[in-house]
């Protein structure tokens, strides 16, 4: 019997026949990532329901020397949620999907936290929090599919990061299966607990390379009583930055601050979104603010007191149509490129944003091939999503080098919030020193001595 057949038989005993997929058609959707640029191969897709089942699956794989690729909602944008492109006949590969692990506990209203299984979606956790008058502090356009395990493992940022911080800072406790099948459980709603290393913090952002996250205890927050959303059409990136700064200086709390360009707005408009303002301008800044008193009047005053605004609109939150123009960027871009979009999620210091924007927008002007840049992002965090459309496949590496050169020149990071995955594994030396990378490899080897978890992710 082949090693893969023996492995499949053992896995069926743990999760049942229906939850070990081996038919190519049944596996197909799990083996391609959201962007369509990354396709992998696996000997089986395994769908456990409980932590005990995950533990048994990992123990079997560890014993067999089989590689495990972990997948949540499969909305990651760096190719980390699918297995390597080629199967290794000597070492079987399974894809472990958390799609059946969707339980969410009752909300602890006094401790302001909730426990969720790894496969629960961001939208479902937020809906459970809302039933208790609270909110999940992480929000992103992929909320209907992105999972608890996914946002923790990528340390997702999202649209509320400017106000609430990243996912790592929302994790109070974690349960995870280590590479040998043992269950690590740090589960406490204590606000202060400094006993040794911050292992939940380490697993946040580890992209499935150190353990399989099975459950997470998340912090919840009190949502603002009322908020407004404004979109201002502006001539310069600096005007957007000034507007965000002025909002804070005037006592408004900035819940979100996003920047879009005319190219992006035109694209989402083509795909059915309303143009946010009557007048056109090179840039559009979306601000969601809350605060005491008459928040609409205070925001209107803020807008009228800011120089360089071509036009502006203001609506009470949730202002879904205004947000729609911003949140549909990723999908509209994916549907508009002749070749796989080169997607680079970078950050620069806030003061460098205007120059970095100009340099990045010029990447398409090299002359030897056509390329359409569409830039947008969480501007309040210095985060720009660089999307390069119609790049000839064989030039994707060159254009990535050019973008990362610009990022380095401005003192930025090659990965702001999406992680490294497979897409950026070649370039980690641009963001971390040799000593730093050695320390990361030592941690990987200590927790996963056979390097079975998510091969090729982060370390290439
Ligand atoms: C339209 C759109 C908008 C987006 N907006 C944002 C945004 O604003 N901010 C942002 O940060 N990201 C954003 N993303 C990217 C993506 O949604 C996030 O990276 C998200 O956290 C991925 O969650 P997921 O459940 O889909 O994970 P997957 O894509 O399934 O996996 C992502 C990584 O996490 C690992 N992983 C998943 N689950 C587990 C687990 N249980 N244990 C261990 N490892 C695991 C995978 O192996 C992989 O390396 C967006 C994506 C789309 C498509």
Image (spheres, rainbow, N blue to C red):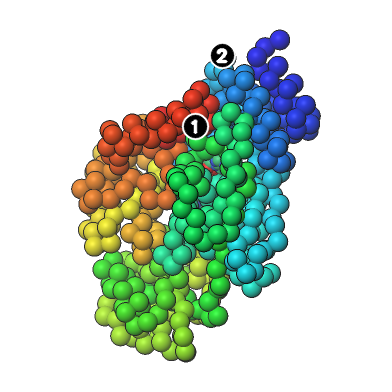
The residue at the far front in this view is 195
- Could you tell me if residue 429 is visible in this image? no
Q: Which mark is residue 148?
A: none
| Image-quadrant location for residue 357 | bottom left
Q: Residue at x 71, y 52 (%)?
A: 103
Please name whichever residue, 97 or 78, is drawn nearer the observer in this view of the structure.
97
Q: Is mark 2 within 8 Å of ligand 1?
A: no
- Could you tell me if residue 134 is visible in this image? yes
Q: Residues within 10 Å of mark 1 (few under 14, many from 20)?
A: some
State the quadrant of the N terminus. top right
Please name whichever residue, 12 or 217, is drawn nearer the observer in this view of the structure.
217
Q: Is residue 265 above or below residue 58?
A: below
Q: Is 94 situated left or right of 158 in this image?
A: right
Q: Residues within 10 Å of mark 2 (few under 14, many from 20)?
A: few
Q: Residue at x 39, y 59 (%)?
A: 377
Q: Position of residue 323 (x, y in %)?
A: 50, 68
Q: Position of residue 374 (x, y in %)?
A: 37, 54
Q: Residue at x 24, y 46 (%)?
A: 408
Residue under label 2, please give it: 90
Q: Earlier in the sequence, mark 1 or mark 2?
A: 2
Q: Is residue 395 above or below residue 197?
A: above
Residue under label 1, please give it: 447
Q: Is residue 334 above or below residue 56?
A: below
Q: Is 407 situated left or right of 105 in this image?
A: left
Q: CA distance from mark 1 to mark 2?
A: 22 Å
């Amino acid at each position: 019997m082949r090693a893969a057949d023996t492995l499949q038989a053992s896995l069926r005993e743990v999760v049942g026949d229906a939850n070990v997929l081996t038919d190519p058609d049944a596996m197909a959707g799990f083996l391609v990532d959201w962007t369509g640029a990354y396709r992998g191969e696996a000997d089986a897709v395994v769908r456990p329901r409980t932590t005990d089942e995950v533990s048994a699956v990992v123990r079997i794989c560890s014993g067999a020397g089989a590689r495990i690729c972990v997948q949540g909602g499969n909305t990651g944008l760096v190719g980390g949620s699918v297995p390597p492109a080629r199967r290794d006949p000597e070492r079987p590969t399974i894809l472990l999907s958390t799609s059946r692990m969707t339980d969410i506990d009752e909300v602890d209203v006094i401790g302001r936290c909730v426990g969720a299984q790894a496969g629960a979606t961001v939208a479902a956790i937020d809906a459970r929090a809302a039933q208790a008058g609270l909110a999940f502090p992480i929000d992103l356009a992929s909320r209907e599919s992105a999972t608890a395990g996914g946002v923790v493992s990528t340390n997702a940022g999202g649209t509320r990061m400017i106000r609430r911080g990243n996912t790592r800072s929302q994790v109070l406790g974690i349960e995870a299966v280590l590479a040998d099948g043992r269950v690590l459980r740090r589960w406490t709603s204590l606000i202060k607990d400094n006993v040794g290393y911050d292992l939940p913090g380490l697993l946040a952002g580890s992209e499935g390379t150190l353990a399989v996250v099975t459950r997470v205890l998340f912090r919840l927050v009190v949502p603002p009583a009322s908020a407004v959303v404004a979109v201002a059409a502006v001539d310069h990136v600096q005007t957007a930055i000034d507007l965000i700064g002025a909002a804070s200086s005037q006592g408004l709390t900035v819940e979100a601050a996003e920047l879009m360009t005319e190219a992006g707005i035109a694209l989402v408009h083509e795909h059915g979104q309303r143009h946010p303002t009557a007048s056109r301008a090179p840039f559009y800044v979306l601000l969601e603010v809350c605060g005491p008193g008459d928040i609409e009047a205070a925001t209107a005053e803020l807008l009228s007191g800011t120089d360089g605004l071509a036009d502006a609109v203001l609506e009470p939150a949730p202002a879904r149509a205004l947000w729609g123009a911003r949140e549909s960027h990723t999908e509209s871009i994916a549907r508009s490129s002749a070749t796989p979009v080169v997607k680079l999620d970078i950050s620069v210091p806030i003061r460098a944003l205007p120059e970095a924007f100009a340099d990045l927008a010029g990447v398409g002007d090299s002359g030897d091939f056509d390329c359409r840049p569409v830039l947008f992002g969480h501007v309040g965090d210095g985060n720009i999503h660089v999307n390069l459309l119609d790049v000839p496949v064989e030039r994707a590496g060159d254009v990535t080098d050019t973008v990362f050169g610009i990022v380095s020149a401005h003192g930025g990071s090659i990965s702001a919030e999406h992680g490294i995955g497979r897409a950026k594994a070649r370039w980690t030396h641009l963001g971390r020193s040799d000593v730093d990378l050695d320390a990361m490899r030592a941690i990987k080897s200590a927790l996963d001595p056979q390097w079975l978890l998510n091969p090729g992710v982060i370390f290439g």
